[in-house]
Image (tube, rainbow, N blue to C red):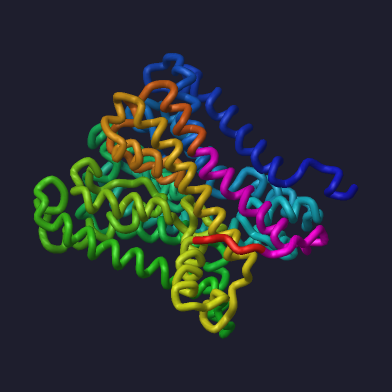
Amino acid sequence: MSYKKHISPAKLITLGFLLVMLIGGTILCLPVSSRAGIFTSPQTAYFTAVSATCVTGLVIEDTATYWSTFGQVTILVMIQIGGLGFMSLAVMLAGFLKRGISPYESVIAAQSYGFSRSGESGEMLKWIAGGTFSLEFLGALLLSIRFIPEYGVKNGIYRSVFLSISAFCNAGFDILGDRHGAFSSLFAYRADPLVSLVIVFLILAGGIGFLVWRDLFARLKGKRIGSYTKMILIVSAVMVAGGAIFFAACEWNNPESLGSLGFPGKLLASLFLSVTPRTAGFAGIPFEALRHPSLVLSILWMFVGGAAGSTAGGAKMGTVAVVLLSIFSTLRGKKRTSLFRHTIRNENVLRAFTLVFLHAATILAGSLLLSADPAAGSFSRALFEGTSAASTVGLSLGITPSLSLFSHLVLMIMMIFGRIGILTISCSLSTKLSQKDNGIVYAETEILM
């Protein structure tokens, strides 16, 4: 059967994610999912399910103190499915069982990661699965060095696995609140090199994208890495290093953030502050304590996000980089946009501008709606929360639990659009802009600017 007779891949991906959210939210409503053994309100349960499946991390109730072990495992499963993609996991399983996938499944797999080509989806998915579970296992193994002595063998391993998966999937959920206080995230480990650096590594590993990792491994075999991989590595390095320097300069003497730490702790916390807004959602320091310039940079970092074809959200580093390159080319009087002596196709430039505009418009519209809620406090606080939701980050200024039902629905829609909408729109644009225009071509006209 031709895949044209099937439901479109974009719709199937969307339905798959929504189905996971619906099932997960329903399970979280049950008494078995809460520590107190009571029914959880649909508002809390489905908000948590959406946040977990969209690998965001915004929560109404603290994960460790409110949810039972069963509820936490349910959340963890949704995080893993959301990070790898519902249909990708299904296609992976089908591929392993059948030793091959159909052209329709190949298209689904490609679009699940934002890839425009689907020819190598089968091998790529096996590579992604192996790489993901290997890195998550490595992260859990390293974290257990710290958590087993602190929590015991069973609880230490459990917390290590949970945090490793959550960090690699850029989800930002944690289960440390029962020991260190509700909504405390990683505050207790902000000066701990082992925990902080392992989490930073996992966040970056999940956020740079699977294509970049494949290129880097191919480089070990003597092959040249592509222009896209070079661009992502440069942008990522600039954001991490530049952000760390900026946060250190702004917060060095702030007694509520870095001021109380020693010199090594300040450097480590600054690095963590620079990495976590890249859609990760973990916090080593309460973001409410940061000064305004730091919050502004955090919003910008959340907006950019990670790389395409990764577990991260945001407008994507490559997309924003293409927009900036195009602007610089225009200012220099060039008609074409180039990167490492290669010309970027006009279709890609148009696609980049469209996606950045849609992402910005979503954040602005959602933040305006959130700002009408008295619990938001101000538009700037609503903008921070809205950017965090639409970019699937999960960082919060502490206002999410106190927001109204309407505001929670707004955040849920923003999270869904940030995880699924941008992905499907990107793939749709890639297909449409690559098609030849066989229609009518109208005469050109001049527009004053």
Find residue 408 and report its horizontal and vertical position in percent: 43, 27
Q: Residue at x 22, y 41 (%)?
A: 288
Residue 300: where, in percent of width, then height? 36, 54
Q: Residue at x 38, y 61 (%)?
A: 201
Figure disc tally: 0
Q: Is residue 209 above or below residue 177?
A: below
Query: What residue lies at 58% left-to-right and 44% top-to-bottom?
Result: 420
In x, y percent, where is residue 441? Answer: 77, 62
Instruction: Find residue 424 and report its horizontal and vertical position in percent.
Output: 63, 48
Magenta region, main secondary structure:
helix
In the rendered image of this protein, does residue 133 appear above or below residue 38? below
> 242 left or right of 93?
left
| Outermost right residue | 1
**Stretch of the chain drawn in magenta:** 415-444
| Image: 241 above or below 75 | below
Residue drawn at x 44%, y 42% as measured from the top left: 363
Residue 301: say if magenta: no
Q: Is residue 155 visible?
A: no
Decide which of 331, 203 is in the foreground and name it.
331
Q: Quadrant of residue 157?
A: top left
Q: Looking at this view, is 405 or 309 the one in front?
A: 405
Indicate yes or no whether the magenta region holds residue 440: yes
141 or 389: nearer the eye? Answer: 389
Q: Residue furthest top?
A: 38
> Can residue 370 be seen in this snapshot?
yes
